[in-house]
Amino acid sequence: MRHLMSPLDFSVEELDRLLDLANDIEKHPDKYSHVCAGKKLATCFYEPSTRTRLSFEAAMLNLGGSVLGFSDAGSSSAAKGESVSDTIRVISCYADICAIRHPKEGAALVASQKSLIPVINAGDGGHQHPTQTLTDLLTIRSLKGRLSDLTIGLCGDLKFGRTVHSLINALIRYENVRFVLISPEELRIPSYIRDDVLRAHQIEFKEVERLEDAMTGLDVLYMTRVQRERFFNEEEYIRLKDFYILTKAKMELAKPDMLVLHPLPRVNEISVEVDEDPRAAYFKQAQYGVYVRMALILTLLGIHAE
């Protein structure tokens, strides 16, 4: 039995096989429409989610399986004080695989240690969001044709953004990947990412404050929102939430084939006028999220389509 807690749980070769499977699902959906008949996915979401929870549910339904679970902690026995360990032991009696999102770092790992079924980390606090990273990798590889030899701009909340932390950890394993880290001083990348990941692996990167100073050299621009739920101080959130807004004018500085990605939800960090730009790939990215989660469910359950 295998779990997914981090993108690093898969080797590069395993990731390539997973992404190949997701591409095959995209091209031949009918081939996979009944392969999980009789299988059940439990979605245990202790904090709000739209895309991640619904894309997991869509993925399992597309495979012919069924879904059960809860969408917030208040509607589960957590409201009565039940521990994550006890919850997953019970869920193991009801389902074949579980996706869990929790506001506390490490909660998914605790669940995996007590579970009798495969557990997928669907986001744990500001720590990891591996299935979003798989989605990002699939989107970049599908639209750019490669995951090596790229300059990636990461913009916005780099301090609390678990999607950013997971993506950096995944991409450093590919050749000649460079990062431009675009954020205000208060939301810079944590030192453990800067020192223990980027510098430790001799990855080329630079840190800038102005989005305009980074645009011209990027192959991919990964925008993130400033997350109100990660702030302890409302005044600090209000001061920083509009620090970066991607506009049509700023897009004119970019390469004609640069991709714009965003894990969503968007607040106002990407102007709606950018949506019509052919380089805006964030809604395609959401669709790729379904394909990659279908591939992940099949992989962890050990199911192969004929």
Image (cartoon, rainbow, N blue to C red):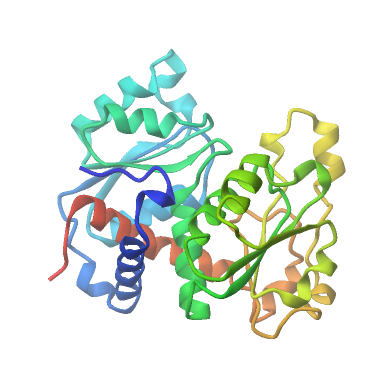
Q: Quadrant of residue 192?
A: top right
Q: Position of residue 6 (x, y in %)?
A: 42, 46
> Seen in the image, is 292 located left or right of residue 183?
left
Decide which of 161, 72 is in the foreground and name it.
Answer: 161
Compared to residue 83, the image places residue 271 above or below, namely below
Q: How many marks?
A: 0
Compared to residue 101, the image places residue 16 above or below, namely below
> Seen in the image, is 301 located left or right of residue 151?
left
Residue placed farthest to the bottom in the image?
A: 256
Q: Quadrant of residue 274?
A: bottom right
Of the 4 image quadrants, the one containing the N terminus is top left
Compared to residue 193, the image places residue 208 above or below, namely below
The residue depicted at 35 percent of the width and 30 percent of the height is 111
Decide which of 299, 52 is in the foreground and name it.
Answer: 299
The residue depicted at 32 percent of the width and 72 percent of the height is 20
Decide which of 62, 245 is in the foreground and name it.
Answer: 245
Q: Position of residue 138 (x, y in %)?
A: 45, 68
Residue placed farthest to the top in the image?
A: 81
The residue depicted at 71 percent of the width and 82 percent of the height is 255
Of the 4 image quadrants, the one containing the C terminus is bottom left
Decide which of 97, 138 is in the foreground and name it.
Answer: 138
